[in-house]
Image (tube, rainbow, N blue to C red):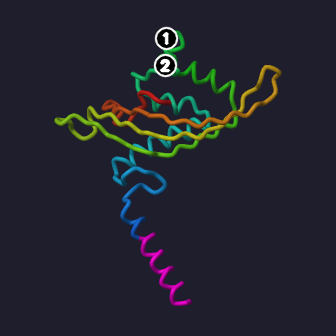
Amino acid sequence: MLARTALLAATAALALGACSSRSGNIPGTRVPDSQANRDLIDVVEAYRLALENQNVNDLARMTSRRYWEDNGSAAGGDDWGHSKFDGEVRARFLKSSDIRYSLRYMNVERRCPKSGNGNEGCIALIDVLIDASFTTNDARGEPMRHDMRDQNQIVLEWDKQDNSWKIVAGM
C-alpha cells in the first residue's frame, strides 16, 4: 500500500511539473511568456494601479491623443475623447471611492506592420477579465458598494513621440 501511494505521488508530481514547465505562460495568466507580452502587461498593470489610486494625471499620461470612449452605448451623446478625459475621469472619481480593480489576462495580441521598425506602427489588443468593486453614495447619501465582473479588450498603440505604449480604447 505504501509503495502504491508513493508511486501515485511521484506520478502526480511529474505530471504537475510537466504541465507547469510546458505551459510557457506568464505566471497567473494565459499569455505566452515573452518580453513583448510582459512589457504590454506592465503598461496595463500601471493603468490598473492608477485607476485604483484614482490618479487622473497618471491615467491621462497613459492615454493616447486618439483615445475615444463610447460608454458602451449606441447613442453618441455620451461619447468623449482625449480632450475631455481629465474632466470626465475626475467627475467619476469624485463620485466613487475604495476602488478595487483586478484583471486576469487572457490574451495579448500584437499587430505590427511588416515593414515596421521595433514597435513603430504597432497596436496591441489585451483581453482581460475584470473583477472590480467600488463605493458610491446612493440617493440618500448612504455608501453603496458595487461589484462588477466583465470581459474587456484594452487597445494600446505605440506612440513614437513618447516612445511608449498608450491606451487608445478600453479603459
Q: Is residue 81 above or below residue 97?
A: above
Count of numbered circles on the image: 2
Mark 2 sits on what residue? 70
Instruction: Decide which of tag 1 and tag 2 comes sooner along the chain.
Output: 2
Element type where label 1 sits in the image: loop
Q: Residue at x 28, y 37 (%)?
A: 111
Q: Could you tell me if the residues under marks 1 and 2 are in contact, i.e. CB atoms within 8 Å?
A: yes
- 50 or 128, which is in the foreground? 128
Instruction: Indicate the position of residue 80 as horizontal and vertical percent values.
Output: 49, 16
Q: Is residue 64 left or right of residue 78?
A: left
Instruction: Indicate the position of residue 25 as horizontal and vertical percent values.
Output: 39, 56
- 9 or 114, which is in the foreground? 9
Classify mark 2: residues with Cα within 10 Å, few (<14), some (14-19) or many (20+): some
Q: Identify the image quadrant of the N terminus.
A: bottom right
Q: Is residue 122 left or right of residue 135?
A: left
Disc sitting over residue 128 in the figure: none
- Quadrant in the rendering for residue 113: top left
Classify mark 1: residues with Cα within 10 Å, few (<14), some (14-19) or many (20+): few
Element type where label 2 sits in the image: loop
Q: Is residue 37 above or below residue 92?
A: below
Mark 1 sits on what residue? 76
Name of the residue lying farthest toward the left = 115
Q: Residue at x 38, y 66 (%)?
A: 21
Q: Residue at x 37, y 47 (%)?
A: 37
Q: Which residues are magenta?
A: 1-17
What kind of secondary structure does the magenta stretch mostly adopt? helix
**Magenta segment includes 3:** yes
**Magenta segment includes 109:** no
Q: Amino acid at mark 2?
A: Asp
- Quadrant in the rendering for residue 55: top right
Q: Amino acid at mark 1?
A: Gly
